[in-house]
Amino acid sequence: MALPEPRRSQAILAAWAASAFALSAVADLRVLGAAALAAAVLFRRGALREARRVALGVLPGALGLSVASWAWLRWLGRPAPPEPFAALVLRAALIAFVSLSVLRRVELVRALAPFPTASRLLALSLAQIHALRLLATESAMGLRSRLPRRPGTRDVLRSSGAVTATLIALSARNARDVADAMRARGFE
Amino acid sequence: MHVPDGFLSPRITLPAWGAAAPLLWWAARRNFGARAAESLPVVGSLTALAFVVQGLMIPVPGGTSAHLTGVALLAVLYNPGVAFVCESLVLALQALVLGAGGLTVLGVNALAMGLLGPGAAWLVYRGLRRLSGPAAAFAGAYAGTQVATLAVAAVLGLQHRLDPAFMPVPFPVVAAAMMAPSLTVLGIVEGLYTVATLAVLRRARLLGAP
């Protein structure tokens, strides 16, 4: 029998946290391989998309560090076995894959519903991020349209300073408005 | 510059969570107050500000780009406690909403990037601001970036020392891989960005910028 919301999302999040910590303790390549197989079966819907995100976001850093370390140790005359490096890459990729797959199946706002302070903070932050990001995106487009060439480091840095100053002023004003609205609705 | 999940074992991540959580609670209470109508809008807005600033990409010579952290700016404008709360929440949002960064390493990343980095930036800024405001802001942001990066590299080095079979990458490789871009590009970009933002805030007389 499926759990009703928000219990379902909370249970999934709790299981995710426990599995992330458990996987982060594993160094055995065979255990990690079995866990990767289990994760691929459990999260087969959308697995290719998440695997692609992991390949682009996590693998380059983990692989780069592993190859550099292996080469460095070899150069020092202390060649290391490849298994720990493979386990490191697989562990980082597996936890990222599980995280992305779980978060796609969870309603975070619903899961936080029994915790009013956390859910209000989440809603406020996400709404402000949306508002501020619109301004930042429009400013970047404005900078590109004003210049006959691609903006360089100096152009973007100067523009970022001005954009951030505007974002700070806007966020302060938004905070005041939200505080007034909360007080008007009886929040203390 | 943050550590992704899988690089650190619970021997390090659990104590880091244990240290970061009460510090975060204390910093939030001290800087934002206990009343929801006062604290939540300000925390939400500043967290959103830090989140959006981290999305600003600066093109750097060589065809790549660097992203800002903006925490040194928050530390200089407000104080390191505000920067710690906001950066920790940004990291939590990235982990819970975007699946980026990591859940197990959240404590380590919050302490390194949210507390040590901004703390160093604030200390350097306070120490040098009598000589020159912009130079102090640049030096603070540069130092903050280096301290945060070095802290992350040191934690990865500690994991290698504790269990080389778990984390086979030795400290010199981690330090070189992280400190080289931080010393040559990221710190300079963060410093210039902090100076540029403070200059605009001062010129526009916003928020009583230093």
Image: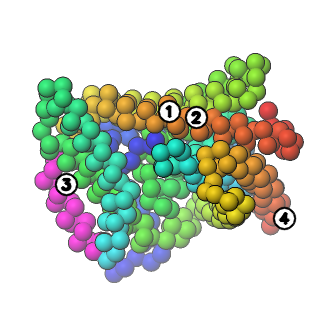
- Contact, CB < 8 Å: mark 2 with mark 1? yes
Per the image, the residue denoted by label 4 is: A184
Front disc: 2 or 3:
2
Please determine whether, in this image, residue B136 is positioned above or below residue B111: above
Which residues fall within the magenta stretch?
Answer: A22-44
**Mark pair 2, 3: CA separation:** 40 Å
Does any portion of residue B168 appear in the rendered image?
yes
Residue designated by label 2: B188
Q: Are marks 3 and 1 on the same chain?
A: no
- The location of residue B72, given as percent across then percent down, is 63, 36
Which of pointers 4 and 3 indicates the residue nearer the eye? Answer: 3
Disc on the earlier residue, 4 or 3: 3
Q: Quadrant of the N terminus of chain A?
A: bottom left
The residue wearing badge 3 is A32
Residue flagged by tag 2: what amino acid is it?
Ile
Q: Is residue A161 left or right of residue A52?
A: right
The residue type indicated by label 3 comes to Leu
| Mark number displayed over residue A61 | none
Q: Nearer the viewer, mark 3 or mark 1?
A: 1
Q: Which mark is residue B184?
A: 1
What amino acid type is highlighted by mark number 1?
A: Thr
**Crowding near pointer 2: few (<14 within 10 Å), some, many (20+)?**
some
Chain letter of disc 1? B
